[in-house]
């Protein structure tokens, strides 16, 4: 004969629709009540749901069978704790998330079991207390061990930190700061995320960590002095990814000496480096050959223009216009914007000067000022295109 306990477990664990609803409720409550989880972005919530589904199923089965956590359960908890040590989420927050989840599960059981006996209720209480006690001890120990390992191999720990940043595995800026502090470093803020690749890769499908570290070392002497931030390098396939101070100099020279090219993006907060990385990667994937120049790297403005051309803009048009045009977007520089428009439309300085009733030398002076203010030469085909797109979207956005 099926007991009330068995009936509840079957109703909660064996119906996928019920499981999905309970898991979503657990995820929502944890996300709202635990600050470290409230800061998680959408890329991290699927992992929370997966762990919640597993925990729900295990707790219900243990309650149904009067069982206890086994070696496989403990290994999984150790793995979760090590992953949280790596992404900087405090173990106290993780354990609180499990306690919050347990309360949700109890509420669901109560809702499904109006005739639950006192014996079954006491058994559930014992099961929860025993499970929480065991996982607290196991996870705290594993978390401490993982933290010590990360701090012991500092170079590897820094690479893992950057790997997690560009993959979006983070909790918040505060968690990142705490993790960096445990490693004795300070992350560059403001930062420049440089994604670089060989122009003509001949070393196979992957770039080595030594090559990425070598590029980082070549930029070390040019980093601004007086700060305590630590630049970091890692690799992604045939590309190096460097987290640098925003004011680092001579990046084009360092890339040129290696026969490399790259895209440098900043502007996002530290907990959104994954967005900057995706923007830079997409720019390198889609940029035409003539967009690359030995004297410069693709910038955040170039990356946004390329995203716009590809049909998936990340920024609003008016922001793209400001990124490309810089001071040129100020009303006080309207005469320069008019000169740029005439030059782009006419195709030459002489024709543009004639259209504006200016001396050609005056028009050329204005083109030089445009180059000085924006860092973009209207005579260069790619930079002329970006300037043209920027003034067009600014006009369309009412700028």
Image (tube, rainbow, N blue to C red):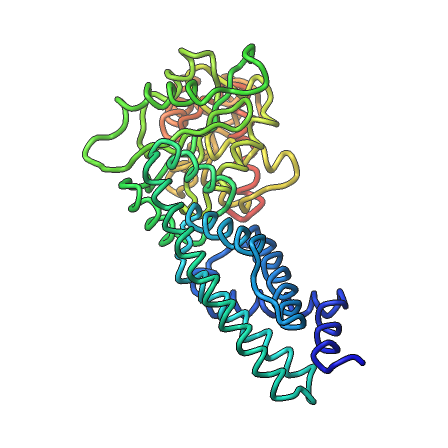
* Image quarter (top left, top right, bottom left or bottom right) of the N terminus: bottom right
Instruction: Tell me what residue is drawn at x 52 percent, y 41 percent.
Output: 167
In screen coordinates, is 9 left or right of 227?
right
Viewer-proximal residue, 204 or 225?
204
Name which quarter of the figure residue 157 lies in. top left
State the image quarter where residue 309 is shown: top right
The residue under the point 33% across, 49% down is: 177
**Left or right of 3 on screen, residue 227:** left
User: Residue 33: x percent and y percent?
Assistant: 47, 70
Q: Residue at x 49, y 51 (%)?
A: 78
State how many labels appear: 0
Residue at 22% over, 36% down: 227
Q: Is residue 75 left or right of residue 142?
A: right
Residue 72 percent coordinates (x, y):
58, 52
Above or below, comparing residue 298 to residue 268 in the picture: above
x then y, percent, for residue 382: 54, 22
In this picture, is 116 found above or below 59?
below
355 is higher (above) or lower (below) than 323: above
Q: Is residue 152 left or right of residue 168?
A: left
Q: Residue furthest left?
A: 226
Residue nearest the observer in this picture, 330 or 158: 158
């Amino acid at each position: 004969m099926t007991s009330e306990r068995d009936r509840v477990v079957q109703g909660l664990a064996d119906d996928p629709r019920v499981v999905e609803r309970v898991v979503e409720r657990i995820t929502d409550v944890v996300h709202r009540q635990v600050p470290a989880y409230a800061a998680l972005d959408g890329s991290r919530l699927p992992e929370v749901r997966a762990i919640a589904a597993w925990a729900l199923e295990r707790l219900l089965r243990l309650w149904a069978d009067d069982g206890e956590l086994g070696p496989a359960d403990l290994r999984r908890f150790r793995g979760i704790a090590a992953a949280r040590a790596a992404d900087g989420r405090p173990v106290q927050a993780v354990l609180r998330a499990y306690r919050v989840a347990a309360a949700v599960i109890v509420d669901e059981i109560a809702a499904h079991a109006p005739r639950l006996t006192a014996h079954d209720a006491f058994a559930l209480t014992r099961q929860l207390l025993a499970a929480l006690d065991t996982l607290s001890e196991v996870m705290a120990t594993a978390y401490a061990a993982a933290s010590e390992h990360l701090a012991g191999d500092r170079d590897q720990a820094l690479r893992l930190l950057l790997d997690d940043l560009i993959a979006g595995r983070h909790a918040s800026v505060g968690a990142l700061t705490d993790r960096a502090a445990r490693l004795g470093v300070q992350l560059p803020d403001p930062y420049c995320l440089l994604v670089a690749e060989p122009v003509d890769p001949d070393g196979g499908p992957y770039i080595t960590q030594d090559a990425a570290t070598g590029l980082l070392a070549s930029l070390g002497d040019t980093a601004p002095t007086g700060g305590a931030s630590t630049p970091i390098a890692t690799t992604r396939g045939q590309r190096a990814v460097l987290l640098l101070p925003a004011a680092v100099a001579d990046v084009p020279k360092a890339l040129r000496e290696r026969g490399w090219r790259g895209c440098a993006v900043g502007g996002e907060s530290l907990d959104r480096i994954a967005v900057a990385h995706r923007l830079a990667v997409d720019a390198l994937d889609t940029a035409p050959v003539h967009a690359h120049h030995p004297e410069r790297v693709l910038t955040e403005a170039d990356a946004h223009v390329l995203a716009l051309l590809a049909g998936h803009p990340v920024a609003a048009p008016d922001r793209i216009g400001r990124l490309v045009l810089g001071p040129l977007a100020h009303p006080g520089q309207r005469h320069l914007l008019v000169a740029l428009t005439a030059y782009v439309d006419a195709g030459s300085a002489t024709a543009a000067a004639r259209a504006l009733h200016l001396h050609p030398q005056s028009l050329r002076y204005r083109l030089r000022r445009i180059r000085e203010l924006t860092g973009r030469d209207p005579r260069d085909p790619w930079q002329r295109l970006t300037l043209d797109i920027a003034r067009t979207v600014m006009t369309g956005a009412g700028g």
